[in-house]
């Protein structure tokens, strides 16, 4: 399968999972509702919304939300152009897919920001479910929707001793979504495996292109025709 189609398929799969999970949580969970996953206290579905960046980071500025939404759109456009350039340059597939994960995650949160305010009613803080409403009659306007988050893994790292006040230290507290996880996975893959990606690519090139001494031996064994081949390789 060509790299372009492979990246497109990856982006599509991430978007489907991301948007399906957000639609379900938005319409079936009350705000701050918390449900254990697989009966584990450290793995939960916890519905919240945020107006900012990944993992609930926000801007305390009047036009911060609009600026963030526009920035996301410009970033995704740049990433799409970058992926196209990577494919044309025959960059290793693993690296291109990592950038694809980042693109898919950014696009998933753009959809929330752009349209959720126009197609959903608000999720009340004190009980009640949101509903899908006629387009344009939701709780917000274009590019002013809230991002739906639901994945919560409050892992307790260790118990504090009584002489330090007792209690537990929470290892991981952000609530995030599939799009955030996709962005993080793409970034971590690049940081952890980029040397392996390009090392494998270099090895493939070495296997395809014979060294100069091999070309010389082939030329000698070929007689007059080999001299012509050697001359062509040196030109």
Image (cartoon, grey):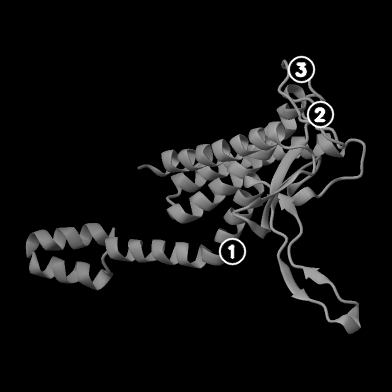
Residue 136's disc is 3
Q: Which residue is drawn at 64% across and 45% down?
A: 179
Q: Is residue 161 above or below residue 8?
A: below
Nearest-to-viewer mark from 1 and 2: 2
Q: Nearer the viewer, residue 52 or 212?
A: 52
Residue 122's disc is 2
Residue 196 left/right relative to 206? right
Residue 122 position in % (x across, y down): 81, 29
Residue 33 left/right relative to 101? right
Can residue 228 be seen here? yes
Can residue 91 be seen here? no
- Crowd rating for badge 2 (residues with CA inside 10 Å; few <14, some 14–19, many 20+): some
Nearest-to-viewer mark from 1 and 3: 3
Q: What residue occupies the far bottom of the structure in this picture? A: 163
Find disc 1 in the rendering and name its residue: 191
Q: How far apart are marks 1 and 3 (CA)?
A: 41 Å
Q: What element carries label 3?
A: loop
- Crowd rating for badge 3 (residues with CA inside 10 Å; few <14, some 14–19, many 20+): some
Q: What element carries label 1?
A: helix
């Amino acid at each position: 399968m060509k790299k372009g189609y492979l990246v497109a398929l990856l982006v599509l799969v991430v978007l489907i999972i991301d948007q399906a999970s957000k639609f379900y949580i938005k319409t079936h969970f009350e705000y701050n509702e918390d449900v254990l996953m697989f009966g584990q206290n450290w793995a939960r579905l916890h519905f919240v919304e945020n107006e900012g960046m990944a993992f609930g980071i926000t801007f305390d500025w009047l036009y911060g939300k609009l600026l963030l939404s526009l920035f996301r759109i410009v970033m995704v456009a740049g990433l799409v152009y970058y992926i196209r350039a990577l494919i044309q340059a025959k960059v290793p597939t693993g690296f291109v897919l990592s950038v694809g994960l980042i693109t898919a995650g950014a696009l998933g949160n753009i959809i929330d920001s752009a349209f959720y305010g126009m197609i959903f009613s608000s999720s009340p803080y004190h009980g009640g479910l949101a509903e899908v409403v006629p387009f344009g009659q939701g709780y917000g306007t274009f590019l002013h929707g809230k991002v739906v988050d639901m994945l919560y893994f409050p892992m307790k790292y260790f118990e504090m001793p009584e002489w330090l006040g007792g209690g537990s230290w929470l290892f991981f507290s952000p609530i995030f979504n599939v799009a955030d996880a996709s962005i993080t996975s793409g970034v971590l893959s690049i940081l952890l495996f980029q040397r392996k990606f390009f090392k494998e690519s270099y090895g493939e090139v070495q296997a395809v292109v014979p060294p100069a001494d091999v070309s010389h031996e082939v030329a000698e064994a070929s007689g007059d025709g080999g001299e012509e081949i050697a001359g062509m390789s040196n030109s």
